[in-house]
């Protein structure tokens, strides 16, 4: 991160520069993991100098998030406001503009969507309203190109396209800026041209076997914590609330888990085990070995795990969990190893992709599934698992 120039070299856009430094810290550590002094130190200014521009940390986040919405609205106005321009040209102009923004302002590419929950209620309402209007405008342009789509289906594909650009904020892999933008445009274009599955097609998670008796207290706590973390975020939930949701009060909660961190570590480990098991079945299910089919099955297993339990939503929430260093390192290693399996298969299917391009593509596919499973406007769709699988297949260009 470049420090903001000190006294005597104050730039005219000091406020935006400070916001940019804060945005990068929020992306890396999460809202709760960043303090005013952290932002000031990273920017090379004093705390009082920071307060000349922003009243508090929440004001900084508000500025960052709303600036992301401003950029998206400006891109939309520039690309689709002129209805005399053919639909395909509107879409291409929009994708090109959004890709450029994502590459240039990577730190806020998706910050407005998931860190916005820390803003005051009136700002959250404003974000929902403005983002909904933007997506509706995109959907209308998409329907000019694909008139067979219903408004709801067009909006679903547009949300998925937005996730392609937001995916750059969940990893650090990069290529030359021009190639990066071209790749993002191509991936988003594939999403928008996805043929959604018919109503009869499902990718439902298998039914769990019937249980005998009641789950243990530990399982009840894990289940309650998973639901609360997935709905409200790790930092917004207390141990007391988890205990109350599980019907356990007082010191009894701490007999099973000494802290929230211990709970979330258990949840993340369970999610990792589910992913590993699904990957094992997917990779061994192709006979004779077929990388394309194995990748299809891997995507299917991911959707099963994601939609069958909220554990993966917690583990891959994008919200830094402030875990003990040892646990954080282990979980990061597990995630990287899992993504590496996808990258290896994708390069076998598309040898023209180098490792970095393949990794960017894989993260785009995974982010579509992660985002849409948490997006209220679309996650109640009855066909969502099959739709997620189909869109992931499109992004990976599996045909």
Image: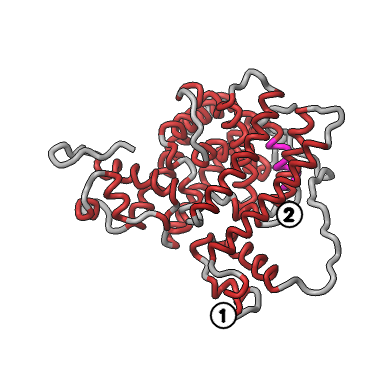
Indicate left or right for 71 with 166 as reference.
left
Among the 4 quarters of the image, the one containing residue 192: top right
Q: Would residue 376 be visible to someone looking at this image?
A: no
Q: Foreground: 65 or 256?
A: 256
- Name the residue located 71 percent from the left edge and 24 percent from the top edge: 349
Magenta residue check for 390: yes
Specify the farthest residue to the left. Answer: 8
- Name the residue located 83 percent from the left edge and 57 percent from the top edge: 207
Q: Foreground: 13 or 354?
A: 354
Q: In the rendered view, would you say 139 is above or below 178?
A: below
Residue 58 lies, in percent from the top left, at 36, 57
Magenta residue check for 365: no
Secondary structure category for the residue under label 2: helix
From the image, which quarter does the N terminus lie in?
top left
Among the 4 quarters of the image, the one containing residue 48: bottom left
Point out the stretch of residues depicted in magenta: 384-392
**Disc 2 or disc 1, which is closer to the eye?**
1
Residue 327 lies, in percent from the top left, at 55, 53
Residue 124 lies, in percent from the top left, at 46, 57
Indicate left or right for 330 with 293 as reference.
left
- Name the residue located 64 percent from the left edge and 50 percent from the top edge: 373
Which numbered disc flags the more N-terminal residue, 2 or 1?
1
Q: Which SS type dominates the magenta stretch?
A: helix
Q: Which mark is residue 308?
A: 2
Q: Which mark is residue 251?
A: 1
């Amino acid at each position: 991160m470049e420090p903001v120039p000190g006294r005597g070299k104050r730039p005219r856009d000091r406020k935006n520069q400070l916001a940019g430094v804060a945005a990068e810290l929020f992306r890396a550590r999460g809202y709760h993991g960043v303090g005013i002094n952290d932002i000031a130190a990273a920017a090379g200014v004093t705390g009082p100098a920071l307060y000349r521009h922003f009243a508090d940390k929440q004001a900084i986040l508000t500025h960052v998030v709303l600036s992301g919405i401003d950029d998206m609205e400006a891109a939309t106005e520039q690309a689709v406001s002129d209805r005399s321009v053919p639909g395909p040209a509107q879409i291409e102009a929009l994708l090109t503009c959004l890709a450029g923004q994502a590459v240039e302002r990577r730190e806020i590419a998706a910050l407005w969507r998931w860190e916005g929950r820390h803003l005051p209620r009136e700002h959250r309402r404003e974000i929902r309203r403005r983002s909904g209007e933007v997506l509706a405008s995109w959907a209308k342009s998409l329907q000019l190109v694909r008139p067979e789509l219903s408004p709801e289906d067009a909006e679903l594909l547009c949300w998925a396209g937005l996730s392609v650009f937001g995916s750059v904020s969940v990893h650090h892999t990069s290529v030359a800026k021009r190639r990066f933008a071209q790749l993002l445009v191509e991936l988003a274009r594939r999403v928008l041209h996805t043929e959604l599955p018919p109503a009869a097609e499902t990718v439902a998670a298998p039914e769990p076997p019937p249980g005998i008796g009641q789950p243990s207290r530990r399982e009840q706590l894990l289940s309650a914590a998973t639901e609360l973390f997935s709905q409200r975020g790790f930092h917004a939930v207390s141990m007391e609330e988890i205990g109350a949701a599980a019907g356990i009060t007082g010191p009894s909660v701490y007999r099973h888990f000494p802290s929230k961190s211990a709970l979330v570590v258990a949840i993340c480990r369970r999610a990792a085990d589910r992913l590993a098991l699904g990957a094992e079945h997917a990779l061994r299910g192709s006979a004779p070995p077929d990388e394309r089919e194995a990748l299809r099955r891997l995507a299917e297993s991911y959707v099963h795990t994601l939609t069958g339990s909220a554990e993966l939503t917690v583990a891959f929430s994008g919200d830094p969990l402030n875990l003990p260093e040892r646990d954080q390192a282990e979980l990061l290693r597990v995630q990287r190893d899992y993504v590496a399996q996808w990258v290896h298969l994708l390069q076998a299917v598309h040898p023209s992709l180098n490792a970095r391009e393949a990794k960017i593509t894989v993260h785009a596919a995974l982010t579509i599934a992660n985002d849409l499973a948490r997006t209220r406007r679309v996650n109640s769709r009855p066909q969502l698992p099959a739709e997620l699988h189909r869109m992931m297949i499109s992004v990976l260009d599996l045909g």
